[in-house]
Image (tube, helix red, strand yellow):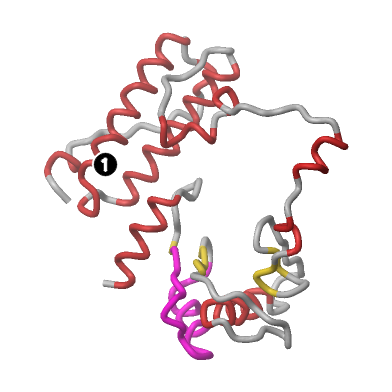
Amino acid sequence: MTSDAQSIGLTAHPESHDLSTRRLQKLYAEADEKLSLFEDLGSEADPELYTWTLHDLRILGSELQRRGVKPYSIPHLGQTFAAESKLDLLAWREYLTTITGQQNCWTVEGLLPAIGLAVLQGRGKQGKSTLVRHLCGAVASGQQFLRRATTAKPVVYVNYEMPDSYMKLLLNAAEIPSNAFILNWPEPVLQLRWSSRRSARIRG
């Protein structure tokens, strides 16, 4: 990491609601400037400092929004701020006419949609992680999963809490596909550029 990154001071703002609006705006601008510096540094930037700065920016931005003050526009964070989102109000019948055939597309036939969210629920130590590891492997290699057809595509396993030793044991329990990647302790809100950067490191 360069000396520029090392010299950045980071301060959390858990009590942001106690700060004046002008102070919040100043701190928000400073955090945004730090984030831009990390982006310029690229792979040389410390990922933990980057994560901390991004988290700080979101806390400040949320408090500004709560007060009805729109934070400075940041293109790479625009989708996370409701004030910068544009929603179209449609009647149900109108909405139904806009649906294409994509609702019938599957990543795992009849189990995991190609577009949307799927949730796997279960008690602790019941095999959820093991099941998902095999699901990811099947999708990454285009093989069947539970006798269901899959659509081959890259997969990213996001690990927030599993120790490295156990994670490696889990991954080594079956064939390792070349199209599967892992994010270890990612930033609070996962973004495409972060995923791409980590994936590039894995491939390298």
Q: Is residue 113 left or right of residue 51?
A: right
Which percent across, then down, holds residue 73?
A: 43, 23
Total of numbered circles in the picture? Answer: 1
Which percent across, then down, holds residue 58?
A: 48, 32
The residue at the point 47 percent across, 10 percent down is 21
> In the displayed image of the protein, which residue is found farthest to the right?
93
The residue at the point 66 percent across, 57 percent down is 115
Q: Is residue 150 left or right of residue 152?
A: right
In the image, residue 114 sits, relative to residue 67, either above or below, namely below
The residue at the point 38 percent across, 50 percent down is 193
Which corner quadrant holds the C terminus?
bottom left
* Amino acid at pointer 1: Phe
In the image, residue 132 sits, relative to residue 21, either above or below, namely below
The residue at the point 67 percent across, 28 percent down is 87
Instruction: Please tell me which residue lies in front, 18 or 31.
Output: 31
Q: Is residue 56 left or right of residue 107?
A: left
In the image, residue 131 sits, relative to residue 83, either above or below, namely below
Residue 24 lies in the magenta stretch: no
Which percent across, then down, holds residue 19?
A: 47, 15
Instruction: Please tell me which residue lies in front, 116 or 71.
Output: 116
Q: Quadrant of residue 91?
A: top right
Q: Is residue 49 left or right of residue 80?
A: left
Graded by Cα atoms within 10 Å as few (under 14), some (14 to 19) or many (20 or more), the crowding at tag 1 reads many
Instruction: Please tell me which residue lies in front, 191 or 121.
Output: 191
> In the displayed image of the protein, which residue is found farthest to the left?
3
Q: Please state the extent of the stretch shown in magenta in the rendering.
A: 162-183
Q: Which residue is mark 1?
A: 38
Q: Secondary structure at mark 1?
A: helix
Which percent across, then down, holds residue 89?
A: 76, 27
